[in-house]
Amino acid sequence: MNIISNKTIKPKIIHFESITSTNTYLMEQGKRGADTWTVVIADSQSGGRGRLGRSFESQNNSGLYMSILLRDVSGFEPSILTVIASVCISRAIEELTGLTMSIKWVNDIYYCGKKVCGILTEGAFENNSLSYAVIGIGVNISVPENGYSDSIKDIAGSVFDSYSTELRDKLASLIVQYLYECTNNYDHGSIYSEYVKRSCIIGKIVEVYGNGEPYNAKVKDIMNDFSLKVVKSDGTEIALKSGEVSLKM
Ligand code: BTN
């Protein structure tokens, strides 16, 4: 595994050919005291997990499946780490491909209307403060040999024409490097403006899934705290902190 290791960042890289979920493994390792910037990469996952209890398809030779453990992050909420990660991943993909990525609030990266990356940030709390966080990143590098499964084939896209472990590791390395820079020297203004610039959701009608019945709303803005300001059909404005919105195409 050839991930950058320079004087400012010395990630500990753990590689698996196959694992259930890099996030599940690393959350467990976090409990056992694993170091900050431990990075786990798997060639495939049999139980890749997404947000809201969904699964994340993780076939062999087609994606980057990576989790990163961060300690000393009590200044960040997990949702902000997801936002920072989405900017860093977009930057890294754009640098290697020359393509422009879009971010769908809050944790998905899209290219040409297809989802190419999902992020799952999980945190362990002690005395109400974040003890460590695991940022899980799944990037569809290329279409799997036998295609995506029926359940995602209409919504999944990829960012390269073909897959190699060298390419995957280069992408992983860039993401880790950007994440290190952005979390160690957090600049809210530049992360906010990069996030908003890439947002593909402002001005669109979305379906909002919260605690009650789903409803349609128009996205007005992404606020300074990264909440999503939407306007309901009766004119009421709501700032969504989390939850799920689906784009009405
Ligand atoms: C989502 O789309 O809701 C988030 C998907 C996150 C997938 C990544 S792949 C590496 C890491 N391990 C997991 O089980 N999930 C994350």
Image (cartoon, rainbow, N blue to C red):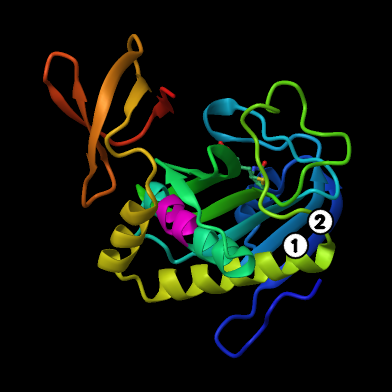
Can you tell which quarter of the image residue 11 is in?
Answer: bottom right
Determine whether, in the image, residue 104 is placed left or right of residue 228.
right
Q: Nearer the viewer, residue 200 or 135?
A: 200
Residue name at image x 53 percent, y 37 percent: 113
Residue designated by label 1: 168
Ligand 1, by image quadrant, is: top right
Horizontal side of residue 128 vs 29, given as left or right = left
Q: Is residue 83 magenta?
A: yes
- The percent coordinates of residue 68 (x first, y second) are 61, 59
Residue 161 pos. (x, y %) = 76, 53
Query: Who's the residue at 72% across and 75% down the image?
Result: 3
Tell me the chief SS of the magenta region: helix
Neighbours of disc 2 within 10 Å: few (<14), some (14-19), many (20+) = some
Quarter of the image with the C terminus in it:
top left
Which span of residues is magenta-colored?
81-87
Q: Secondary structure at mark 2?
A: loop
Residue 189 visible within the image: yes
Magenta-drawn stretch contains 93: no
Image coords of residue 184 (percent x, y): 42, 75
Q: Which residue is mark 2?
A: 163
238, 133: nearer the viewer: 238
Q: Earlier in the sequence, mark 2 or mark 1?
A: 2
Q: Are marks 2 and 1 in contact (CB under 8 Å)?
A: yes
- Which labelled disc corresponds to residue 90? none
From mark 2 to mark 1, how far is it between C-alphas? 7 Å
Helix, strand or loop under label 1:
helix
**Residue 36 in view:** no
**Image position of 23 (left or right of 165):** left
Q: Is mark 2 within 8 Å of ligand 1?
A: no
